[in-house]
Amino acid sequence: MRILLVALPAGLLLALAGPAAHAQNAALNARIAQLATQEEPKVIAWRRDLHEHPELGNQETRTAALIAAHLKKLGLEVQTGVGRTGVVGVLRGGKPGPVVALRADMDGLPLTEANELPFASKVKTTYLGQPVGVMHACGHDTHVAMLMGAAEVLTQVKADLPGTVKFIFQPAEEGSLPGVEGGAKLMVKEGVLDKPKVDAIFGVHINAQTEVGNLAYRSGGEMASSDRFAIKVQGKGSHGAYPWNSVDPVVTAAQIIMGLQTIVSRQVKLIDDAAVVTVGTINGGVRYNVIPPDVELTGTIRALNPEVQKQIWASIRRIATNIAESAGATAEVTIDPYVPVTINDPALTARMLPTLQAAAGAAHVREIKAVTGAEDFSFYQEKVPGLFLFVGGMTKGQDPATTADHHTAGFRIDESGLTLGVKTLATLAADYLNAPKR
């Protein structure tokens, strides 16, 4: 997915931050920053190894073994096989206190890499019956490497942590094979936020259109929900030369597609909430002069407000069934909810804003407009307060309009941005645990 990040005015950013109290341990943060810098060669080496050996969702066995070995070497409590191939590490601080979780996703995508890199992926597999390459085309290799680095940093300062840090390495963020459960939803179902019970969770995503050295976030709805819909239009087939003998599902499907365009343009209050309804496939017929008996449409729904999401569901059903009925056909609508809206808890976001500014420098932290890409980090946020943010991965001076999108064969990351990710994750955990009780 291409994630376009648009900055909001600095004055608005500060106003939203408000007077949130946040006690920072300057000495501890300086130590974390120093350790993060020292870890950079390791983090880059891990990232390159992971990039060269990507694995698809729910198949991340090599990745999981690498992570588990690292966490065990650090002396953490380690659990494997969570959510199929996920790994969880628990670090007990030097004093009692709350529990904070840090999350990274592990899976690659079914894409053949086009980059000429010494560590480019050459992995091949079969996906949905088709031969294809496997590539870390969304930066999950960097997420794993940064969280492994944060685990090593926090282990070295654990005596100064009043509480517990849980490291969640999650499979299948990009989804798994049809009918196979996975990802954050399954990890939550299996109790990843319990034993010990998590009080707050943080996550980062590398961004190939944001310069290295920068952090971007949004309070409230940050990333869209993502739902799949299918509409099966049932008509009556006939010879293409005698259309009056048919109930043409092709024409009916075309009318439905046009009708769906009015949902966002005429029914959603766009000054409040953006939304997307996209038809991605049209399948029907086998021969040019035969009107088929049925046609199937599939597509995606994106919304930044749960109420708008439900409104769109109802509109799709109403438009499809009524247009089909007007043509003498029928329409069967199936909506498959996939990922909820990624909503950054406003209170937690305001509380941790000084941490972000300390990690990157105030001038390098910006609040952005919401994006219509989706993230299953939202399943954790449904259960506990969470903050999800973006870390710059674009070389300084590059034009974001010309950099390769996420989920493309040319996607690449400037590795000099990884240290900020390590520092940000570790400092978020330390500052949250060291904040005064409320």
Image (spheres, rainbow, N blue to C red):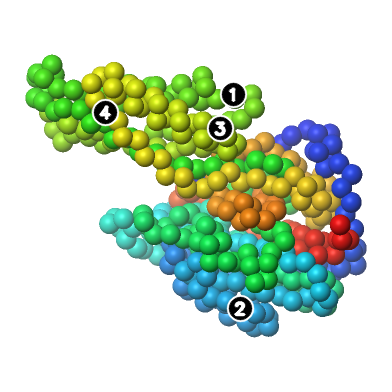
Q: What residue lies at 58% left-to-right and 43% top-to-bottom? A: 341
Whether residue 337 sits left or right of residue 69 in the image: it is left
Q: Residue flagged by tag 3: what amino acid is it?
A: Val
- Secondary element type, mark 2: strand
Q: Is residue 12 visible?
A: yes
Precedes in sequence: disc 4 or disc 2: 2
Q: Residues within 10 Å of mark 4 (few under 14, many from 20)?
A: many
Quadrant of residue 30 within the rendered picture? bottom right
- Whole-angstrom CA distance, mark 2 to mark 1, is 47 Å
Residue depth check, mark 2 versus mark 3: number of the one nearer the observer: 3
Quadrant of residue 308 within the rendered picture? top right
Q: Residues within 10 Å of mark 2 (few under 14, many from 20)?
A: some
Q: Residues within 10 Å of mark 1 (few under 14, many from 20)?
A: few
In the rendered structure, find residue 330 and report the number of the disc placed on it.
4
Precedes in sequence: disc 1 or disc 3: 1
The one nearer the camera, 332 or 116, is 332
Q: Residue flagged by tag 4: what amino acid is it?
A: Thr
Residue on which the image places disc 2:
78
In the rendered structure, find residue 308 and report the number of the disc placed on it.
3
Q: Position of residue 108 (x, y in %)?
A: 47, 59
Q: What residue lies at 87% left-to-right and 61% top-to-bottom? A: 437
Residue on which the image places disc 1:
269
Q: Position of residue 243 (x, y in %)?
A: 13, 19
Q: Residue flagged by tag 1: what amino acid is it?
A: Lys
Residue depth check, mark 1 versus mark 4: number of the one nearer the observer: 4
Q: Position of residue 31 (x, y in %)?
A: 84, 69
- Whole-angstrom CA distance, mark 1 to mark 3, is 9 Å
Q: Residues within 10 Å of mark 3 (few under 14, many from 20)?
A: some
